Image (cartoon, coloured by chain):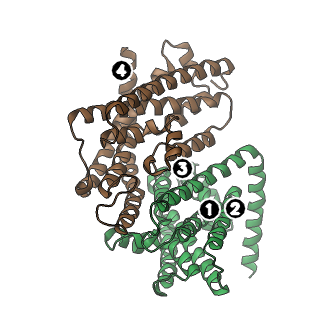
Amino acid sequence: MTKYLHVLSIGVQNTLVYRLNFLFRAAFGLVPLMGTLYVWRAIYAGKADGAQIGAYTLSGMVSYYLLVNFVDALTAVAEDDWQIAADIKDGNISQFLLKPIDYLAYRLCLYLSGRAIYTSVALVPVAVFTYFLRADFTWPTDAGTAGLFLLSVLMAGLIQFFLAYTLALLAFWVLDVSTFIFIQFAFEYLASGHLFPLDLLPAWLAQMLKLTPYPYLCWFPVSVYLGRVTGPELWTGLAIQAAWVAAGYALARHVWARGIRKYSAVGG
Amino acid sequence: MKTLARYLSLYAAMWRNSVTREMSFKLNFVLWIVVELLWFALQLVFMSVLYSHTDSIAGWSKWEVVMLVGCANFIQQLFTAFFLTNLTDISEHIRTGKLDFMLLLPVNTRFLVSLRKVDLGSYINSACALAVMAYAAWRLDFTPTAVQAAGFAVMALAGLTVHYSLMFLLVTTSFWTVRAQGVVYGYYNLFNIARLPDSAFPRGAFKAFFTFGLPMLLVSNVPVKVLLGKLGSPWELALLAGMAGACLGVSELVWRWSLRHYTSASS
């Protein structure tokens, strides 16, 4: 176990080097968010006071996007997928096959430490931004909701990681995985509720999307926070999310096992 | 005239090189087009979801906004086709010392570093963006006059100049910072607001900055407004043209100044 603690600490040290880069990234990332929020304000301005769109008031909508931004900072994969693909292509994983260290656990540690540093840096601009929008920002109704939200974010992060990990493992078979990563990301951007709340889609389409893991990456945790899913729906949602975590883990292990059989340690 | 002919033949040679290079990875070439088209489709989906809940956003109807998104994408794809990879490569040229060789060649160095490679897929993507604009025009039951079309072309060119000059200016900073990756990422975020209707933004620091500082709210809004006859005042044309000229001028000054202080990295 201690060896993974070492990996965590190395990960923290490595990513700390990029703290200024992270700060810029988080600050620049607020520009499109502001643009989107202005457009939503313009839409609500054209409607009666207190009007709702897809059961969101203006405050609800603003909070939704702020929370998406927050969940994104906590869970998004930054460089992990590129690095994994590069490790495979350059033959760097050979050393992990020889050492008593599990590559998946190793990458997970790096991902967690990277996210911890990114979030703590990104929190500065995000908190300033949220402060300006505090009038429209809602706080969770009670501590229980906040706790379940964090649990849900943690599971979202794990699904996100397993997804990126599995996709990067395609590098065992293809030369360039970047196009696959971008195509997947485009789907994720829409289907996870990143672009807009899924409640705005026609009901049948939203229902269909909820059969995929995507809504559990972003839309579901945010809805938990906003108190939009409650009661039995909340518990089944969390159970489904946990099931996706397990499925993601199983898939990652399976693809790795298949890939390693094909691996020929080029260059390593 | 002779210089122009010489530069045109140089550019033709770079074109041939790029075609050869890209065609050696055919599948990748097609996949990148798919990636870009998917992101374009995503923006259109976003707008159509917005318009399924409202009829107008700050005075823009659905198909007008589709035209705007199409135009923003058209300009962005042209920018990618001509400049993007070249500009991101500049910091690499500086880091590896390759820039020294380019400085020695008997051509304008800015021409060389800006236009060396051509991104073929982006031509196809910009054609797709034009097709979406044409479809939106058909849905609007609108046929532009020759003057409107010419105005659109000139203003789109001004928009392209703004993107090119600003990005060029940003990568010139890599003379000092060496890594320009963050710059590219940052600029991509700015493309995002270029496709939103400018009238949705209330007067204030945000709008002022993205109009008079980094004129993102002009680059695709003004061309579409000329085309559709939606201009608030003819001054908007002068503003975009002026900003394009100013951005180009500043980027040239900073480039020359940087070169004068360039001491080479390695080699």
Question: Callout 4, which amino acid?
Answer: Leu
Nearest-to-viewer mark from 4 and 1:
1
Nearest-to-viewer mark from 2 and 4:
2
Question: Callout 3, which amino acid?
Answer: Arg
Q: Are marks 4 and 3 on the same chain?
A: no
Cβ atoms at labels 2 and 4 below 8 Å apart? no
Nearest-to-viewer mark from 3 and 2:
2
Residue drawn at (63%, 76%) of the image: B141
> Which type of secondary structure does the marked residue at label 4 adopt?
helix
* Mark sitting on residue B179: none
Instruction: Give the camera-side residue of B42 and A104.
Output: B42
Instruction: Answer with the quarter of the image where residue B153 lies.
Output: bottom right
Q: Output the chain of dot 4.
A: A
Left or right of B191 in this view: A17: left
Q: Which residue is mark 1?
A: B77
User: Upstream in the sequence, badge 1 or badge 2?
Assistant: 1
Instruction: Give the camera-side residue of A202 and A161.
Output: A202
